Image: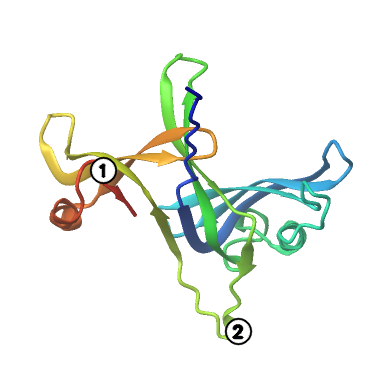
Amino acid sequence: MGETENTLRDAEALINVEGILAEKKLEKVKDTKGNDVIRGTLDIKVDDTHTIKLNVYASEKTKAGELSKAYPGVETVFEEYQSIAEVGQEAATKVRCRKGSLQPNTYVDKNTGMVRNSVRYSANFLTRVDENTRNVFEPKNEFEVEGFIRGIRPEVNKEGEETGRLIVSLLVPTSKMIEPLDLIAPEEIADSINETFDINQTAR
């Protein structure tokens, strides 16, 4: 019998972030083919307690050698957007990112040898929020992810007491592997989560 190859498509895992550009760490370099590449990170301040780090990588040309649709916008960010670190909060650029990428990531900690799980956020399409042109500035950090629910359990504190929140454990197919991702459901929606979703269900 011949071998059967099963392939999973990448799960949809998108983020929408809107806030003030807190710090811009971008650089323009050349890739191995001599094309300009802009890479680095952007820190977006959503409120006084939440700042989201977006990873950015854009080449002026695609793998097929065509001009990239994302590169001109990222170049505008590189050249024109100003951060709180540069000019202060009042003058810093207000930024909107729609349909950025949420990427679960499993890795081995080099210091401890233990397996760790993290989440990486990436975006190549960003726009300025100019309230003078009737754009409404609405700071937010939202995400939407689909995956296979392998478990739903109460969250407990260090004393072993339930907090009222739920931990929803997902398996999320990515281009590299099937990654685990735990989501925390606040107490006010815990009952709704239990009523709506089941273990061994694929859900959004």
Is 122 situated above or below 72?
above
Rendered residue at 42%/17% (across/down): 114
Give amino acid for label 1. Val
> Could you say where residue 85 lies in the image, as x and y percent from the top left?
63, 53
Element type at mark 1? strand
**Residue 199 versus residue 142: which sits nearer the camera?**
199
Q: Residue 19 location in percent, x, y?
A: 51, 63
- Disc 2, SS: helix
Asked whether the beta carbons under mark 1 and mark 2 sit within 8 Å of each other, the answer is no
Earlier in the chain: of badge 1 and badge 2, it is 2
Which quadrant of the view contains residue 21? bottom right
Of residues 136 and 204, the one drawn nearer to the viewer in this rendering:
204
Q: Which residue position is annotated with label 1?
A: 168
Instruction: Estimate the spatial distance between the alpha carbons at disc 1 and disc 2, rounded to whole Å.
Output: 42 Å
Residue position marked by numbered label 2 in the rendering: 132
Quarter of the figure that contains the C terminus = bottom left
